[in-house]
Image (cartoon, rainbow, N blue to C red):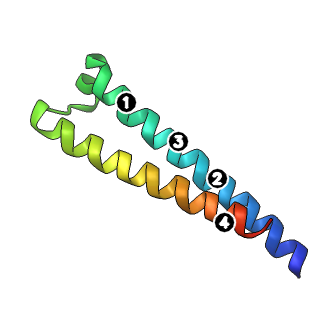
Amino acid sequence: MGKVRKTISLLIGGIQCGLGVLASVFAYLVYADSWMRGLLAVTSEELYISMFLLLVFGIFSVFSGLLLVNKER
């Protein structure tokens, strides 16, 4: 049972880290690329709050994933 738990924790932790990085990259792309903002219909008033929310989600996701990975090692 211990090996299964360790494997699942490593897998979930890796997925969380990946999603956090993707959210952070997506936040940058929304900020930097006007075509992406137009595609998503994000106004300039909504830009900073959407960036903030994506970055917060990304940071917490990466930290949570790293804690899962490091806890099982």
> Mark number for residue 2?
none
Q: Is residue 31 visible?
A: yes
Marks 1/2: CA–CA distance: 20 Å
- Mark 1 or 2: the one toward you: 1
Q: Is residue 36 visible?
A: no
> Mark number for residue 15?
2
Which residue is denoted by mark 3 in the rendering? 21
Residue pictured at 88% horizontal, 82% vertical: 1
Secondary structure beneath label 1? helix
Drawn side of residue 50 relative to residue 5, left or right = left
Secondary structure beneath label 4? helix
Which residue is denoted by mark 1 in the rendering? 28
Q: Is residue 36 above or below residue 18?
A: above
Residue pictured at 80% horizontal, 75% vertical: 5
Of the numbered discs 4 and 2, the one sitting upstream in the chain is 2
Drawn side of residue 66 relative to residue 46, left or right = right
